[in-house]
């Protein structure tokens, strides 16, 4: 890796510390960005409100939380052969403590902690046009200045707490899965209610049911879930991956979702119904995302192809769930895969237990939460504990809560009132020198996210180098570049079934949020576009010469 010389240190002017770059977030994205920019010789400071590194894997400690796609040993950093050789994954779908332990190991191994300040929320971020720098303010009121602001704030990081009448009055324990307590939570002997049956809900439900006296699952939208079939990772797989790491890394980079799947090229209509059934059965038994990615190429683009798989999974639900009425309540009705595809370890089986009740909120909506439980149209459900598995204000929520102020004091909330405009999912017009990792308009949540973070940080590093080598002080995209990027993202999405479904991908889970599918579905094409833009001298961007103010001269 190229190193910029000399390595600048942070400087202090008055009461303000100055860095080349401030990174917000010490998750998968922020940790790698720190390593990468620091290796280039930049002075960097990372801030995170959490009390530990790991982001998602620090916050989401609910029972059952684990990686589903792409599983071990591919949900990890790929840039370092050493890390790959050194870290042993135990299971095919590592659980939250394992991923957190891995990220803590990486932070220690790369000596990242000395540049990370934890338990520190960034409450404000303003661009100073004259200085060509960002000033951020922490929750303790401390101000810090940096030329570059890297927002690695997470796409699934701003919890969505439902606005249910009376929720504040509940007298029992109440936890959001995305803000799970650091100390163990016991369900033993308790009547527990879980609201929400998305990714976190289907992971938590089987675990809670095993321990609780009674579990009531409040379901608004039934979802398709595929067995994860988590199992011990075969040491032979680890050995082969280690021996062929360069080739496997190239394969991940070339894959449309950054995963080691063999993507099918075959169309569903090319097989007979019997052949399709046999293939679906085989992949269902294999478990994981294979069913979606390795069966047919047109499942997410062709309604009829999608229907064949949806019917198959609905049949599986009827097979597994013994009570036909409960099975019907669990029956999903949307294009399979167009909501975050769920993987589970015994979700549908849980509804065969005597201590589990399913409440279908479409026919029996919640009226209010009372001090002692949940009141639906048909009656009261007495509870000792409420678990809110209600997800996140995804992709844009955390950035909007940060609400940086760009040129002329324009706030991100104003800029994104109607549409989440970005260029390349990396930068925003009127917000010079602000970079996003996994921003709207990037592949973000539909890509192997550690790999995506690495590749995006690489682009950010190259961009910073480009500016520095030419004496440029600021970069931002043009509004026209944003418009054409929006068209590119939207045109790609419109070739698929994704925009036809209400989901957190489209913002439908948050009342009042603009409906926009803002994930770039190009996979390798996206990263090729990043490279092309850079190769053309950052086409679509405008630059400012560096203004040699006292502060800038300090570097
Ligand atoms: C339960 C769960 C399972 C998942 N499974 C998978 C999977 O199988 N495969 C996959 O690819 N992805 C998965 N994801 C997505 C996961 O979020 C990403 O893989 C990855 O961890 C995101 O890393 P990040 O650094 O971008 O963001 P995060 O890990 O979300 O980190 C962002 C950090 O920024 C901090 N932050 C935000 N705002 C501020 C602020 N204003 N001031 C200070 N700090 C701030 C937060 O505290 C947080 O620690 C899963 C997510 C969840 C919730």
Image: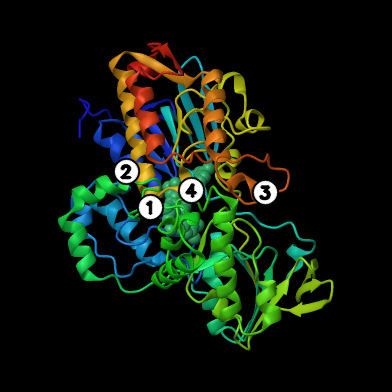
Residue 254: mark in rendering: 2
- Check disc 4 and report the residue beneath it: 445
Mark 3 crowd level (few <14, some 14–19, many ≥20, 10 Å Cα) = some
Q: Is residue 461 left or right of residue 210?
A: left
Is the shortest distance between ligand 1 and the CB of mark 1 under 8 Å?
A: no
- Check disc 3 and report the residue beneath it: 508
- The mark that comes first in sequence, 1 or 2, is 2
Quarter of the figure with residue 483: top right
- The mark that comes first in sequence, 3 or 4, is 4
Q: CA distance from mark 1 to mark 2?
A: 11 Å
Q: Residue 389: image x %, image y %?
A: 61, 64
Q: Are marks 4 and 1 in contact (CB under 8 Å)?
A: no
> From the image, which quarter does the C terminus lie in?
top left
Q: CA distance from mark 3 to mark 1?
A: 29 Å
Quarter of the figure with residue 352: bottom right
- The mark that comes first in sequence, 4 or 1, is 1
- Check disc 1 and report the residue beneath it: 263
Residue found at the very far left of the displayed protein: 243
Q: What residue is rendered at 49% in x and 14% in y?
A: 130
Q: What residue is rendered at 66% in x and 61% in y?
A: 333
Q: Residue 386: image x %, image y %?
A: 66, 71
């Amino acid at each position: 890796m190229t190193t910029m010389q000399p390595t600048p240190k942070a400087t202090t002017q008055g009461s303000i510390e100055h860095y080349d770059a401030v990174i917000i977030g010490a998750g998968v994205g922020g940790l790698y960005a720190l390593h990468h920019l620091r290796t280039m010789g930049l002075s960097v400071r990372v801030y995170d409100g959490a009390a530990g590194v790991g982001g998602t894997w620090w916050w989401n400690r609910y029972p059952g939380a684990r990686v589903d796609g792409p599983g071990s040993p591919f949900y990890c950093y790929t840039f370092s052969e050493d890390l790959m050789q050194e870290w042993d994954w135990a299971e095919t779908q590592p659980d939250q403590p394992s991923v957190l332990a891995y990220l803590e190991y990486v932070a220690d191994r790369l000596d990242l902690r000395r540049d990370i300040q934890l338990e520190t929320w960034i409450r404000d971020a303003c661009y100073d046009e004259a200085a060509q720098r960002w000033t951020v303010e922490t929750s303790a009121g401390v101000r810090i200045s940096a030329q570059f602001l890297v927002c690695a704030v997470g796409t699934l990081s701003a919890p969505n707490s439902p606005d249910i009448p009376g929720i504040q009055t509940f007298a029992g324990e109440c936890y959001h899965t995305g803000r799970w307590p650091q100390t163990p939570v016991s369900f033993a002997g308790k009547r527990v209610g879980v609201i929400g049956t998305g990714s976190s809900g289907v992971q938590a439900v089987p675990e809670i049911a095993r321990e609780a006296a009674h579990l009531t699952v409040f379901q608004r939208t039934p979802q398709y879930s595929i067995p994860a079939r988590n199992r011990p990772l075969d040491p032979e797989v680890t050995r082969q991956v280690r021996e062929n790491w360069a080739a496997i890394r190239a394969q991940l980079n070339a894959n449309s979702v950054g995963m080691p799947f063999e993507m099918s090229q075959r169309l569903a209509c090319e097989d007979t119904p019997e052949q399709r059934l046999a293939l679906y059965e085989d992949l269902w038994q294999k478990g994981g995302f294979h069913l979606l990615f390795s069966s047919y190429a047109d499942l997410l683009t062709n309604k009829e192809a999608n229907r064949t798989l949806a019917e198959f999974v609905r049949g599986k639900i009827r097979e597994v769930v013994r009570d036909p009425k409960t099975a019907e309540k669990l029956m999903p009705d949307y294009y399979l895969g167009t909501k975050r595809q769920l993987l589970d370890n015994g979700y549908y089986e849980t509804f065969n237990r005597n201590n589990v009740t399913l409440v279908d909120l479409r026919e029996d909506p919640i009226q209010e939460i009372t001090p002692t439980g949940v009141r639906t149209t048909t009656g009261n459900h007495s509870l000792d504990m409420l678990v809110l598995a209600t997800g996140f204000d995804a992709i844009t929520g955390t950035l909007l809560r940060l609400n940086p102020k760009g040129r002329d004091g324009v706030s991100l909330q104003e800029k994104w009132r109607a549409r989440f405009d970005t260029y390349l999912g990396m930068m925003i017009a009127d917000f010079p020198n602000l970079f996003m990792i996994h921003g709207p308009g990037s592949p973000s949540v539909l890509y192997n996210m550690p790999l995506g973070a690495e590749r995006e940080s690489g682009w950010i590093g190259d961009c910073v180098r480009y500016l520095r080598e030419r004496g440029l002080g600021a970069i931002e995209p043009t509004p026209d570049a944003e418009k054409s990027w929006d068209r590119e993202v939207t045109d790609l999405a419109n070739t698929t079934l994704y925009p036809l479904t209400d989901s957190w991908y489209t913002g439908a889970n948050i009342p009042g949020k603009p409906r926009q599918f803002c994930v770039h579905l190009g996979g390798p094409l996206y990263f090729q576009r990043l490279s092309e833009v850079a190769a053309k001298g950052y086409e679509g961007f405008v630059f400012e010469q560096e203004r040699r103010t006292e502060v800038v001269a300090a570097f």
